[in-house]
Amino acid sequence: MEFPDKVSTQTSTASSHTTTTTQTSGRFAPIGVNISFIRSVFGILMMVEMVIGLLVWALIAGSHFGNDPAFGWVMFVAVFLWLLTIILFVLYMLGLTAKLPMVPWVLVVMCFNLGATVLYITAFSTIAARVNQQKKTAKYQYNNRAAAAFFAAVVTIAYGASSFFSFQSWREYSSSTS
């Protein structure tokens, strides 16, 4: 559905009745799914990050970690980055980044991926260091934490690969604009 070129508005008060006509500044392009992004390396890596990130935080949430703040950190990193990855994925998938050209998306995505890689390295090392602490007391907890550590390592590698490709894109973008 397209917006009309002219919009008529009527306002009325007790003393007067006026009609004004205003011009809209332009047409809004429809929002559609960008299939080429979904098939690109960035799109595939983001889908991997979303699925594996979901596994990490689900496994951490499913294990009892008591009063240990280290698991709270891992949970925060996993959920926070999962949500941000979903937001970025939706922005790119719907082509909304093209509607916001004032944002340097190449730089934003590169910084996001680098930050996510660093945060997931800390989360992975935290969960991996605590896997053996529960091995003798609760096998179920041990299995959850071991699986969470494995998937945290996988998602760390995925964010690292995204960082590498984002850096290459940023370098190409910055050299083409100079």
Image: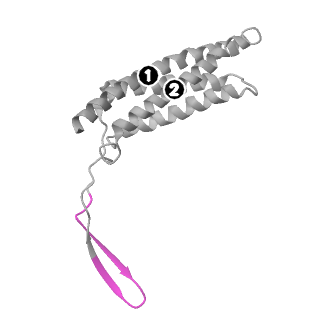
Amino acid residing under circle 1:
Gly
**Residue drawn at 32 percent across, 83 percent down:** 18
Q: Which residue is mark 1?
A: 160
Residue ID at (58%, 23%): 122
The answer to whether 89 appears left or right of 53 in the picture is left
**156 vs 86: above or below:** above
Residue at screen point 23% across, 38% down = 178
| Amino acid type, callout 2 | Val
47 drawn magenta: no
Quarter where residue 2 is shown: bottom left
- Where residue 118 is drawn, which disc sits there? 2
Residue 30 appears left or right of 141:
left
Q: Residues within 10 Å of mark 1 (few under 14, many from 20)?
A: many
Q: Would you identify the image quadrant in which residue 80 lies?
A: top right
Circle 1 sits in a helix, a strand or a loop, which is it?
A: helix
Q: Front-most of 125 and 140? A: 125
Residue 136 in the figure: left or right of residue 9: right
The residues colored magenta run 3-20
18 in magenta: yes
